[in-house]
Amino acid sequence: MLGLGALLLAGGLLAAVGTRLLTGPLAVLALGTVLASIVALVVVATMGTPETRRKIAPYGLLKPGMLWLALFYLAPLFTLLRLSLSTLPSRFAVEAEFDWNFDNYVTAFTDFGPQFQRAFMYSGIATILTIAIGYPLAYVIAFRGGKFRNLLLGLVVIPFFTSYLIRTIAWRSILSDNGIATGMIGKFRLTWMLETMGMMDNGRLINTPAAVIFGLTYNFLPFMILPIYVSLEKVDIRLIDAAKDLYSTSTAAFRKVVLPLSLPGVFAGTLLTFIPAAGDFVNALYLGSPNTTMIGNSIQDQFLVQNNVPLASAMSFVLMLIITVFVIIYSRFFGTEDLA
Amino acid sequence: MTTRRPNPLTGPRSAMTRRQLLMRAGALGAAGMTLPAFLAACGSDGGSGASATTPGTTPGTTPGTTPGGGGAGGSLFFENWPSYIDPTEDGATGTVDRFKEATGIDMRYTEAYNDNNEYFAKIQPLLGRGEPIDPDIIAPTSWLANRLIRLEWLDKLPLDQVPNAANLRADLQNPAWDPTGEYSLPWQTGFAGIAYNSDATGREITSVDDLFDPEFAGKVGALTEMRDTIGVIAMSLGIDISTLTTFDEAKPAFDKLQEAKDSGQIRRFHGNDYFDDLSNGNLAITIGWSGDVAAIARDNPAVKFVFPESGATSWADTMVLPKGAKNVAQAAEWMNFVYDPVQAAQITAWVGYVSPVDGVQDEVAKIDPELANDPLVFPDDATLANTKGFAPLAEDVEAEYDAAFSSITGA
């Protein structure tokens, strides 16, 4: 109990200093306490009896992570929450005044509805596409990769060697009106088909919703492939043989054995893809048009162009809340607890 | 989002290097709109052109510069837009190095100023609390200089130590953004008008109405710089942008832009990252900056800049002293140096924008006669008469303009 208490106290104090709730001598005192608790921990860990050491060990191991989270996660999150309920006394004021101003949240909902909708629609479609593309790929690498497995995995990761921004900007020239992609599509006379499917607009690929979704899919694909691969790789191939011995068809074996065992990977991949994609603004910025902006672009604009930090904070919070709700619902349906 | 990037416009001798520099700056500038930190890192790297560490000790070697102070030594820090000054290259000594040699001042010149709004967000926490920032001179565009003056975040220039300030172009004296002329000296000026790719349009363009021609649907761009985009459109609607005081006066221009955006006429709003799109025809026609377009035209003669019949907007990037700047005497020497027509001509010959200094045309003629006759760099009086600067806006009115504009650009 003492260990847990000290752990929470140290975390709380550090977070309070980080949010500037404690300033001046109080902050020094708080930091001193945190430091003392670390020293005490080290002393107990080296000099204590085996019994106390065994008791204190878990809290000691938690301490670095706890302090890190307190300073770099809890403190910023709390600051953001406070800012989102503040008012700027004048447009270019440095400090927003905290006054329980819920108007920011009202504005975030009423003025930015389309941007929120687009963000979740685009990232949702992109997530489904990454599963559709990534699952078969991960399957082939895991079960048919043979000695080329590591090479193939390396190829999946290679794009990370180039900056995310540079890759996205590069797509602009590939997808441009007189670029390679449109040229090929024109050559194979597929333009009418893509236009009907809504993937092209007026003969162009870029600056359309499809281009933004494509960019998101492309950029987040490795985050889907890798976790699926990891879960597939652990599947014991003899389970499939066993299924077949019991007169299961290949399809049924996949559906009843491999797929359920790989769902944790799909679940993890979905979170890794959907969450950052929903907040992304780079793809909409470079591949989109003024009619495809996502909520990330709006938040960036409010922070850096309009200087409306309270509103931007409220929008960030709304985004986080909606994502959290989505994730909770999703994990209810696809939760992996009973798949261990 | 005003990543206006000055362009290289001089002789073909090293056009390729400058072009590359230009594209790099463009890519970084574009990134800067979104990732300030990343950009800040790259921006300071971009200052390498002026980083030669040879603090000269021979004052007075450069003809025509006898700074009022005359004191040698000390240091100076100027934070400017990327590619906005002639660097030391190909055997030519850049302006910064010539200044160091002439005065013995250890000057630091960085190119971390990529975007007005972003830079404002960066200095606001310090200047707003009355704390000084590192640079002694910064280069806000006139409207931001005006905002800084109103917020009282600037120090007055030591104009009594800048005798060459007398060379300031008559039309820039006591400008609307700095009515007393005590806080700012223009660095470079230029115009926003219509830029188009004649291969893509298939005809010559003369009017702002062509931006709204359904024939070009989805191939039209506009600047993210509100004053330039709204300014050009408002002038085509007969609105005098130099006298605006309320939002309603400019509303027709916003409505027209909103309509074009909703119908998909406008493909995208851009900072200075429109060169590729314009050059390869993704954008047939857009609102662009004069100097930029002249640079693209060197590679692709189909790209042209026109002053619309209804008029173009004029802008100025300025030199100002943020409040608490330490090296005021050195800043005065620098301003005096670059307001010497001989020195200013070197800068103009490289950046290709309109110099605020009188007498530059004659000096440029000695370096590059072709450039001296370029109407985009040395516009005639008739052209100048058909350009207008955007009126300074009161704080709450400016907020209305910015909010309306950003709801159109989709952000």
Image (cartoon, rainbow, N blue to C red):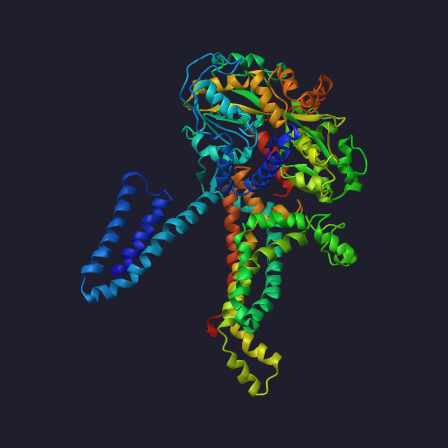
Above or below, B87 relative to B268: above
Residue at 56 percent across and 54 percent down: it is A278
Position in image of residue A312 (x %, y %):
52, 43
Residue at the extreme front: B91
Is A64 on the left or on the right of B81, as rendered? left
Q: Quadrant of the C terminus of chain B?
A: top right
B206 or A127, which is in the foreground?
B206
Is residue A62 something that shows in the picture? yes
Residue drawn at x 43%, y 32% as measured from the top left: B126
Between B124 and B327, which is closer to the camera in this rendering?
B327
Q: Position of residue B37 (x, y in %)?
A: 48, 41
Check the picture and name the quadrant holding the N terminus of chain B. top right
The image quadrant of residue B345 is top right
Give the farthest residue toward the bottom.
A246
Horizontally, residue A70 falls left or right of residue A284, namely left
> What percent of the width, then of the height, locates residue A237?
52, 79
Q: Is residue A335 visible?
A: no
Q: Is residue A298 above or below residue B79?
A: below
Residue, x 58% and y 70% (percent of image)? A140
Q: Is residue B70 left or right of residue A225?
A: left
Q: Total of numbered circles in the picture?
A: 0
Is A337 or A283 nearer to us in this picture? A283
